[in-house]
Image (cartoon, helix red, strand yellow):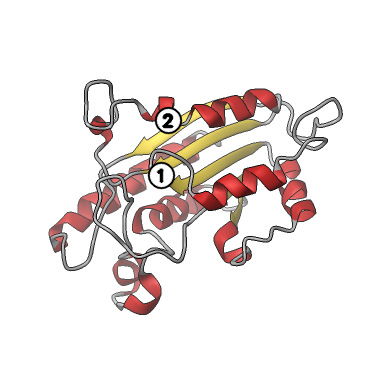
Amino acid sequence: LAGITQFFFSGFNTAIYAIIPDCVEYGEWKTGLRNDGFQYAFVSLGNKIVMETVKAAVPDMDIRRVAELYPDWKFDIKTEQEALAAADTIILQFPVYWYAYPALLKKYIEDVFAHGFAYGSTGTRLKWKTLIVSCTTGAPYDAYAEGKVQSHTMDSYMFPAAQLAQLCGMHFGGVLHTGGVMYIPGVSKPEDREPIIKACQAHGAKLASLLK
């Protein structure tokens, strides 16, 4: 059994920075209909496609869309802890914001991965499980390297997740990162969208292979 917790950052104005992740064309690609009022920043093209691809390959997995479940950011901690405890593999799926987790994911970890549950002398509920980071960025994959514009690898930026796994007695399954996932309506060219879709489908297929 695998569990995926999916995080999106809602309530912000889209800006054009290399670090800002993919914007949202998923609904139009999937249905042929465009609904700009719903489709901006709350849901990202790349992350939606990743999750759809994984779910198709592993239909019995539990996907928890935390931003939708808790729009007020007030988590049902017991429910979330039980969902994590029931999974063999926990995947954190999110678009990277300023070289780190989105704020919602940071708060989720602070509240849900609590002492006495996830770590500490009696906090053994996550022990021996696998934690995987699956993320997307607007900047290209190759930009995340020493000497490049982002200066460090994504593995380096996601060190807190590796340390979280160690603290909780989990196995860290590594970081799966796809870059260049940014499509901004009215700015990006329409033909730029298809390579993003294909890259995220490949990302999802690789992620699904880790669960089999």
Quadrant where the N terminus is found in the figure: top right
Q: Residue 143 placed where, x, y %?
A: 24, 32
Residue at 75%, 41% (x, y): give it.
Answer: 85
Relative to 124, 158 lies left or right: left
Relative to 159, 83 lies left or right: right
Q: Mark 1 and mark 2 in contact (Cβ < 8 Å)? A: yes
- Quadrant for residue 39, please give it: bottom left
Q: Give me the disc on residue 186.
A: none
Q: Please indicate, yes or no, whether residue 6 appears anywhere in the rendered image.
A: no
Relative to 168, 131 lies left or right: left
- Quadrant for residue 140, please give it: top left
Q: Residue 102 placed where, x, y %?
A: 48, 48
Q: Nearer the viewer, residue 179 or 111?
A: 111
Q: Nearer the viewer, residue 61 or 127?
A: 127
Task: Relative to 130, say whether 200 is above or below.
Answer: below
Tag 1: amino acid: Val
Circle 2 packing at 10 Å, graded few (<14), some (14-19), many (20+), is: some
Label 1 secondary element: loop
Q: Nearer the viewer, residue 105 or 57?
A: 105
**Residue furthest toward the right?**
122
Label 2 secondary element: helix
Residue at 31%, 62% (x, y): give it.
Answer: 14
Residue at 24%, 55% (x, y): give it.
Answer: 16
* Residue at mark 1: 96
Tag 2: amino acid: Tyr
Residue at 86%, 29% (x, y): give it.
Answer: 122
Task: Tell me the CA gap for discs 2 and 1.
Answer: 10 Å
Q: How many marks are shown on the rendered structure?
A: 2
Q: Give me the disc on residue 157.
A: 2
